[in-house]
Image (cartoon, coloured by chain):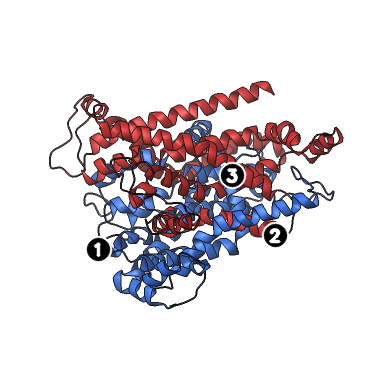
Amino acid sequence: MSADAAAVPHAIPPTAAHSLKKTDRTARRTAVLMLLPAAVLVITFLLIPIGLTFVLAFTNARLISPEPARFIGVDNFVRLFGNDTFWKSLANTVIFAVVIVPIQSAVALGLAVLINTRMRGTNFFRTVYFLPVVTSMVVVSMLWMFMYQPDGLFNVLLAKFGIQGPDWLGDPHWALISIILLSIWQACGFHMVIWLSGLQTIPGELYEAASLDGAGRWQQFVHVTWPGLRQTAIFILITITIAAFSLFTQVNIMTEGGPLDSTSTVVFMAVRTGFQQQQTGYASAISLVFFVIVLAVSLVQRYLTRDKDARR
Amino acid sequence: MSASPTVLATGDSPVATRADKPRRPASFRPGESRPGPARKVLGLVLRIVLALVFGLPLVFMIVSSFKPDLQIFADLGSWAAFLPVGDVSLDNYTAVFDRVPFATFLLNSVFISASTVVFGLIINSMAAFALSRIEFRGQKVILGIVLATLIVPFETMALPLLWWVNTIPYLDGSQGWLDTYAVQIVPFVANAFSIYLFYQYFDSIPKELDEAARVDGAGWFRIYRSIVMPLSGPAVATVAILTFLPAWNQYLWPLMVVQTESLRPVMVGIDYFKQLKVAWGQIMAYATIITVPVLALFVAFQRAFINSIASSGVKG
């Protein structure tokens, strides 16, 4: 490469032009060879399936079928938009996201601020708050399902305070709330760590200056901490939102979408139609709707990030 | 846990997190406050309460795994629920081993996640090396594609992917990949986020090292293997952890692609306990044995775990 040649002119032998071309070609060949395995896998198992979503959504493809898939236009979407379970699932997914995004990020920020104070045992507490994150969602779902039993831990504890606990997972009004609670419990340690690394990037001098100016703790938070966390905040909001839209494991293990579709989600519905009922075309239509939502969310993120760069 | 982050903001140095930064000698650390005594007590109480909120359910799980169901429910109303007291035994564990081929599930999970991590480290680091250190045309375009795929969560393409792996020929020429180890490993080896993490890290290693090595006659592959990789320990640890956790926790995918019992991983095995009569003690025992190894790994390599999560976030 020319850049290399400029940096180490003495390395180029008299027949420079010839050998430069040769190294150029070898470099390219090596690069292709090193990229090849990843490229083949990314194309086969990522790019093609993404492309397939757009194709299969307009066909009647089935998972296992002797007949080849046929193009059926927008039939899948007509059927989907006329399906009450779909609207219920979409509503549940949106409610889940709208509730969980602010609460989870706020709780995680609270934990991060609490942990960011120098005190004995900080490491211990951080570890404990983080434990649910390394516990698989499958295990967390089973554990909470156990605690949510009508005669389980939660209701026995509530009864101690004279409160008659609900049938958490069996009551359509409570089932989604129950899933929201455990999801927050499982994930907020993850975002606590990300908030923490954001907090560490704020220069200490700013706090010193603020306290010299007589700013209290809350004022310091509003005028120093929060503005400094803007970038982190955008990242966290987006990751929680997309993860929330992907809600599946908890639902599949704890409620299977019930009772009365009160916990069905977009992904759960896609899996039920595409895997259990083997209607790949229909499931792809659901996936496509999901994909468009995720894309919209990340475009909003792009917009917010650009806004920040412009202000700098 | 879906650990793979979906969106990235711009960041320059990859794995530099709080642990790597030099400690400030002054009493002020960034963002840190110096609480007064009353606040200190309040803060400590709050921390303890939160530790109970996050820790007790796990303690409850582990403790219950040693008790028969009758004892578990009898203990619910008191602190005994969180203490290994009363009728404590390993009965639930022996019942679990009778009920499911646990050793098989465990070996499958270990094999699947280890393979995904090892192949992933090699293939993604090679790709990142080519993208960051060797100059060639089309580099920017390829990197752009890699970054663009980061926003696509696996769940959006899981169903089309299921159809696809059932359609394409398997390694031996027969149709479909369903019901194999390969289908649980190969689709997850190449990972855009791992490539991105390696790419960022490699970019922070001085390029003069390559030039010096090339003057000495080393080829690009040699530079990758003997210079860049040995300097990339933190990136390797980060990618290994961020690959291992989702691989170990895989649930949706193996649920769909594996029918044969002998190929199932541990997470899918939990479905065995939801059928027939529900025995909570046994479920807690199963949950405990598939969780404790990961928790132990986490406690042992805590700093690396936390740094890898932090590095998936934003660097200011």
Residue wearing tag 3: A108
User: Which residue type does callout 2 highlight?
Assistant: Gly
Q: Classify residue B204 as left or right of residue A142.
A: right
The numbered mark, 2 or 3, whose residue comes first in the sequence reads 3
Q: Which chain is blue?
A: B
Dot 3 falls on which chain? A
Residue wearing tag 1: B276
Q: CA distance from mark 3 to mark 1?
A: 39 Å
Q: Which mark is residue A121?
A: 2
Q: Which chain is red?
A: A
Q: Nearer the viewer, residue A8 or B176?
A: B176
Residue lying farthest to the left in this orientation: A66
Dot 1 falls on which chain? B
Dot 2 falls on which chain? A
The residue shown at (55%, 55%) is: B53
In this view, B49 is above or below A44: below
For the image, the number of numbered tags is: 3
- Quadrant location of residue A271? top left
The residue shown at (31%, 44%) is: A257
Q: CA distance from mark 2 to mark 3?
A: 19 Å
